[in-house]
Image (cartoon, grey):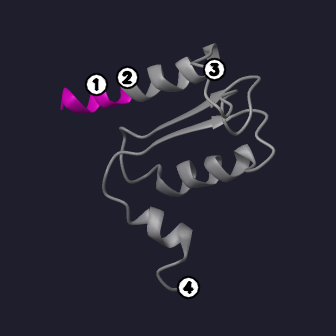
Amino acid sequence: EGRLNLKKRIQKLNVPLCLIHGQNDLTVPVSESADLYEWNSDSDSLNEFHVIQNTGHTFNAVHPFPGSNDKLEQVLNVTYGFIEKLNRI
């Protein structure tokens, strides 16, 4: 119920939120990002929630990093687009 209550904290968030989640994430279920988005959806109309299809928790990035891939590029493009949208307001 205190400051570690994620639902309560995200409901009070007063900045635009961009959530990006891998469809096949075995570490964190997509439903958890969906909950975060829903809990904050009334706070800001600029919020975005994206599910990247056919990828997991790391968007097919591995260590050592050999370079980017199409899923990671989708994440970067969504992130860039979100930042660009914020720069226009």
Which mark sits nearer the N-terminus, 4 or 2? 4
Mark 1 = which residue? 84
Callout 4–callout 2 Cβ contact below 8 Å: no
- Nearer the observer, 86 or 45: 86
**Quick check: 40 above or below 79?**
below
Image: 56 above or below 13: above
> Which residue shows up at 45% across the image and 64% down it?
11
Mark 2 and mark 1 residues within 8 Å of each other at the beta carbon: yes
**Mark 1 or mark 3, which has the lower sequence index?**
3
In magenta stretch: residue 61? no
Say which label, 3 or 4, has the lower sequence index.
Answer: 4
Q: How far is disc 2 from disc 1 in space, using C-alphas?
A: 5 Å
Q: Position of residue 81 (x, y in %)?
A: 37, 22
Element on which disc 4 rests: loop
> What whole-number distance in Å separates the C-alpha atoms at marks 3 and 4?
37 Å
Q: Residues within 10 Å of mark 3 (few under 14, many from 20)?
A: some
Disc 1 + disc 3, Cβ < 8 Å: no
Q: Which residue is mark 3?
A: 71
Q: What's the CA distance linking mark 4 and mark 2?
A: 35 Å
- The magenta segment is 81-89
Q: Which mark is residue 1?
A: 4
Say which amino acid is labelled 4.
Answer: Glu
Q: Is residue 12 left or right of residue 68?
A: left
| Mark 1 Cα shell of 10 Å, populated few (<14), some (14-19), many (≥20) | few
Instruction: Point out the frontmost of discs 3 and 4.
Output: 3
Q: Nearer the viewer, mark 3 or mark 2?
A: 3
Q: Residue at x 55, y 19 (%)?
A: 74
